Image (cartoon, rainbow, N blue to C red):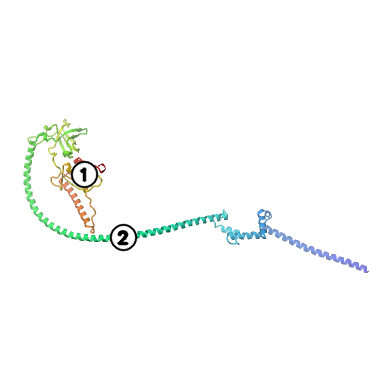
């Protein structure tokens, strides 16, 4: 009994122990399964997280492996290494470690060329621009310094000019003051002179009135005497002319011979400027001197032709035929005569105005002396005024009249204006008198034609 009990107890204990062990194993297996399941889930989670960090096909890339090695050197994870690297880069690029690549991209959108160029190239371009701007700034600073120096030099020059100008103004003011004093003196002298002239003029007017009254009486008496003398002179002149025409030999009436004939009805005679032949003079043509015989009343026979002088040389004159007897043409050797022509006659000239005898293009009153000398050498005589026996009036250019001086003009200027005004008045008066009396009026060129001379130009002397 006792044995069975011990065996039963042992079996029961064994069974119990086996049951306990089985229960422990079951519990252990259950716990291990749960742990394995949790670990599997953790592995799957880690694998999913790892894929987010780096994909399986990227793990063996050289750049990824290189980054892993660099991270291990600094005892950092790959992500931590890359986060720190990005923060460092952003700190260098944008100045903020918290900026992301998206932030960097957004900030770079406002930079010109950042979408196609690298940051380093942009930095290099910006550095080059900055260097160029600094160089330009230095050049501008140099130019500014030079401009400031030039400005200072110009300021100094202007100051010098102003000082010189002021000195000139002071000197001119001093001269003007002296001139004013002289003008006042001249004005005082002019006033005194005017007073004396007015007094003298009044005296001359009174004397002129008395002289006019006296001369009017003399003119009345002389007019009466003149009428008597003119009657006597007419009678004597008629007798003298008759005696002169009858008493002179025919040969003495010949003035020249025909020395040549031109094809265009022009005749050349053997007298010219030396014998004082003038343009427009007429001659009658005769076969010989015997044909020029006046009748009992002193009248000359008509010639076979008449000539008019159209050009004059020193010893000959060219004439045109104005009339001709048909069948009796003018031939070389014919004689010409003009009953009123006298080679010994002395022509009287009145000369006035400005002349350009030296041919320099400037007419002056002094060259009137040269004109008068030429006329005198030709054989003429110069008269001061037009009179009844004057033959020609030679007028040059009208004298120039300066502007009328003001009331404050110097006395000498006023005197010069009055003198020139008198010359202009005399010029106009001579022209009107010549036109009224029929005296021939010659200009400078017509005078040269008359005397047969022409002055040489300055360059030909």
Q: Alpha carbon of mark 2 to alpha carbon of mark 1: how far?
A: 51 Å
How packed is label 2: few (under 14 Cα within 10 Å), some, or many (20 or more)? few
- Kindly identify the residue that appears in the image at 8 percent across and 51 percent down: 218
Relative to 170, does residue 386 appear above or below in the rendering?
above
**Secondary-structure class at tag 1:** helix
The mark total stands at 2
**Residue 426: percent from left, percent from top:** 18, 50
> Please, which residue is most extreme toward the right here?
1
**Residue 169: percent from left, percent from top:** 31, 60
Identify which residue, 64 or 294, lies in the foreground: 64
Tag 1 or tag 2, which sits nearer the N-term?
2
Q: What residue sits right under mark 1 in the picture?
A: 444
Relative to 393, does residue 335 appear above or below in the rendering?
above
Q: Quadrant of residue 151?
A: bottom left
**Does 219 sit left or right of 317 as displayed?**
left
Identify which residue, 235 or 191, lies in the foreground: 191
Image quadrant occupied by the N terminus: bottom right
Q: Which of the numbered marks, if any, corresponds to residue 169?
A: 2
**Residue 94: percent from left, percent from top:** 58, 60
**Does 258 sit left or right of 87 as displayed?**
left
Q: Quadrant of residue 380?
A: top left
Between marks 2 and 1 in the image, the one whose residue lies nearer the viewer: 2
Identify which residue, 57 or 349, lies in the foreground: 349
**Residue 297: percent from left, percent from top:** 7, 36
> Please, which residue is most extreme toward the bottom here?
2
Q: Do the residues labelled 2 and 1 touch (CB within 8 Å)?
A: no
Q: Which of the numbered marks, if any, corresponds to residue 209?
A: none
Relative to 122, does residue 258 appear above or below in the rendering?
above
**Secondary-structure class at tag 2:** helix
Q: Quadrant of residue 347?
A: top left
């Amino acid at each position: 009994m006792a044995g069975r009990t011990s065996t039963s107890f042992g079996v029961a204990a064994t069974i119990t122990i086996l049951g306990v062990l089985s229960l422990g194993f079951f519990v252990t297996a259950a716990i291990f399964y749960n742990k394995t399941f949790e670990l599997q889930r953790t592995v799957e989670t880690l694998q999913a997280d790892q894929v987010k960090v780096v994909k399986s096909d990227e793990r063996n890339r050289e750049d990824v492996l290189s980054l892993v090695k660099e991270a291990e050197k600094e005892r950092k994870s790959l992500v931590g290494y890359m986060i720190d690297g990005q923060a460092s880069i952003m700190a260098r690029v944008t100045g903020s470690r918290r900026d992301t690549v998206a932030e960097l991209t957004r900030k770079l959108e406002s930079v010109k060329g950042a979408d196609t160029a690298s940051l380093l190239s942009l930095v290099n371009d910006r550095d080059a621009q900055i260097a160029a701007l600094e160089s330009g700034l230095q050049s501008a600073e140099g130019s500014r310094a030079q401009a400031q120096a030039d400005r200072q030099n110009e300021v100094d020059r202007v100051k010098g000019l102003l000082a010189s100008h002021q000195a000139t103004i002071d000197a001119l003011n001093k001269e003007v003051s002296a001139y004013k004093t002289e003008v006042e003196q001249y004005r005082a002298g002019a006033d005194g002179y005017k007073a004396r002239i007015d007094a003298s003029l009044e005296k001359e007017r009174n004397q002129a009135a008395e002289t006019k009254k006296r001369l009017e009486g003399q003119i009345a008496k002389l007019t009466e005497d003149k009428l008597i003398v003119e009657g006597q002179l007419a009678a004597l002149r008629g007798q003298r002319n008759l005696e002169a025409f009858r008493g002179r030999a025919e040969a003495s009436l010949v003035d020249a011979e025909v020395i040549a004939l031109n094809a265009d009805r022009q005749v050349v005679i053997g007298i010219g400027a030396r014998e004082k032949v003038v343009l427009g003079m007429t001659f009658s043509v005769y076969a010989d001197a015997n044909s020029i015989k006046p009748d009992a009343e002193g009248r000359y026979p008509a010639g076979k032709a008449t000539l008019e002088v159209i050009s004059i040389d020193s010893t000959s004159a060219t004439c045109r035929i104005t009339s001709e007897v048909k069948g009796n043409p003018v031939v070389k050797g014919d004689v010409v005569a003009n009953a009123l022509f006298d080679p010994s006659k002395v022509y009287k000239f009145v000369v006035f105005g400005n002349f350009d005898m030296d041919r320099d293009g400037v007419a002056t009153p002094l060259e009137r002396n040269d004109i008068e000398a030429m006329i005198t050498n030709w054989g003429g005589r110069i008269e001061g005024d037009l009179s009844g026996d004057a033959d020609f009036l030679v007028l040059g250019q009208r004298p120039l009249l300066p502007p009328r001086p003001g009331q404050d003009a110097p006395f000498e200027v006023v005197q010069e204006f009055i003198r020139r005004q008198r010359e202009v008045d005399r010029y106009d008066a001579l022209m009107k008198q010549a036109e009224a009396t029929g005296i021939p009026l010659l200009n400078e060129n017509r005078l040269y034609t008359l005397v047969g001379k022409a002055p040489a130009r300055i360059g030909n002397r």
